[in-house]
Image (spheres, grey):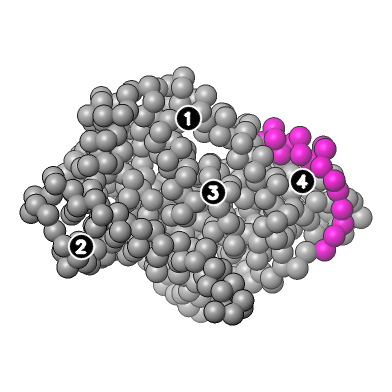
Amino acid sequence: MNKLVRDNLIESLFSPFGLVIVLTVFTFILVLVYMPETHSAGNYGLVDVFGFWQHGFFGLIGFTLQMMMILVFGYSLAVFRPVNLFLRKIASFPEKLISAVILTASITMISGLLNWGFGLIVGAVLARFMHEALKEKGKSTNPALLAASGYLGMGIWHGGLSGSAPLTVAESGHFLEGKVGVIPVEATLFSSFNLVTTVGLFLIFLSTAWYFARKSSKTSEASDSIAIKPIGPGVENNLARIAGLGMLFILIVGVVFEENKGLSFVSLNWVNFLLFSLTLIVYRSTANFSIAVGSGLKSSVDIFIQFPFYAGILGLITDSGLLTTFSNWGVAMANPELFPFFTFFSAALVNLFVPSGGGQWAIQGPIIFETASAIGLDKGKMIMVFAYGDQISNLLQPFWALPLMAITGVSVRKIFPYTLIFFLVGLIWLMVSIFLFL
């Protein structure tokens, strides 16, 4: 094997798709080597293991579509021309790097809490516009720091309104309902635990960004970024807007006349329904709506390709009995004081190999619930502990930073020193919060 072929192979293995293939092969080997005695059919062979994987492969089709939709509609709203022009207008306000960084970080994190796909694109576009505006004014700038600040939404998103794990379990019929039932968002996203933790993380990220802006080197270097093509509302018809308003009316009626009190109506499907209707409304015509959604679909290709493999992994560990075995080990080794930290760090670690909150939850969720139930931990809080671990290591994971790097033209090598520090300060705060609340 020549050097070029070897280098290409190594690069492929460390790509997002390559990592899920490696993880699948590793799980195959683990299941075959371990052969759990607890499996209902006793010992099994290679053909059975293939069956477990194939049986699970399409087990998360609905969940896959939900994850794609939440990214696509978030992306579509971010590239809407008025939103794009609004971001450019905001970028014209700061006169110094420090105010540009603070504004970029704040808007990015708020957008990320509303919708992670929206926050990812808004942060990237805003970071680029801030850099360009400062250059035009002849001011010193730091495109790498601005880009890192524009990525902070991915470090806080899972405690927000598009958090895949808490929204999934809040929905009737989710894939773990048979084990844990439906857990409303009052126990997860809108719990005092999450509100205090997320607000604290927001302020710590903001303080760190402020410190960086004061101390970091400032340059006026150019960035090699792709062109942004904002999409405006259509003029040929209002069919999309009429459909969107109809959907929004139905949604409002459902909320007003909801029999259950509180926020139990909020789920992943509810959020996607709202985003769908808003996207239809703003683009007005079906033609421009289709163009925007088509553009967003390109950014969701990795979810479409990889989620069936995550579902296959889930099928392997569930049907083979390995999930039950892992849960028993967790119960034997864990206690109420240590298991939350084990969950937090394992979620952060697994996210480096499974760069998707939804795909990761499909794999780790069953194990977390089995163990938490056995040792008497609050399930709502444990969902959020998982969510915090998943989100914080995004700051080390380049998978979701690919759109950011393309839009800003800043390489991962330049962004990483900043995101590493953001990761460390966020990690410390989240550990303190878990210790105080659990």
Q: Identity of the amino acid at label 4?
A: Ala
Residue span colored magenta: 206-222
Tell me: residue 46, above or below residue 421. Answer: below
Residue at the far top: name it. Answer: 436
Mark 4 or 3, which is nearer the eye?
3
Residue at the far left: name it. Answer: 41
What is the CA distance from the residue labelled 4 to the residue labelled 1? Answer: 26 Å
Q: Are marks 1 and 3 in contact (CB under 8 Å)?
A: no
* Secondary structure of residue under mark 2: helix
Q: Which mark is residue 394?
A: 3
- The tag earlier along the polypeptide, 1 or 3, is 1
What is the CA distance from the residue labelled 1 to the residue labelled 3? Answer: 20 Å
Q: Position of residue 330 (x, y in %)?
A: 29, 34
Tell me: residue 398, above or below residue 241. Answer: above
Residue drawn at 62 percent across, 65 percent down: 81
What is the CA distance from the residue labelled 2 to the residue labelled 3? Answer: 32 Å
Image quarter hosting the N terminus: bottom right
Q: Position of residue 100 (x, y in %)?
A: 76, 46
What is the CA distance from the residue labelled 1 to the residue labelled 2? Answer: 43 Å
Residue 60 appears in the rendering: no
Residue at image mark 4: 100
Q: Nearer the viewer, residue 65 or 345?
A: 345
Indicate the quadrant where residue 405 lies. Answer: bottom right
Residue drawn at 74 percent across, 44 percent down: 101
Left or right: where 66 falls relative to 205: left
Residue at image mark 2: 49
Q: Identity of the amino acid at label 1?
A: Leu
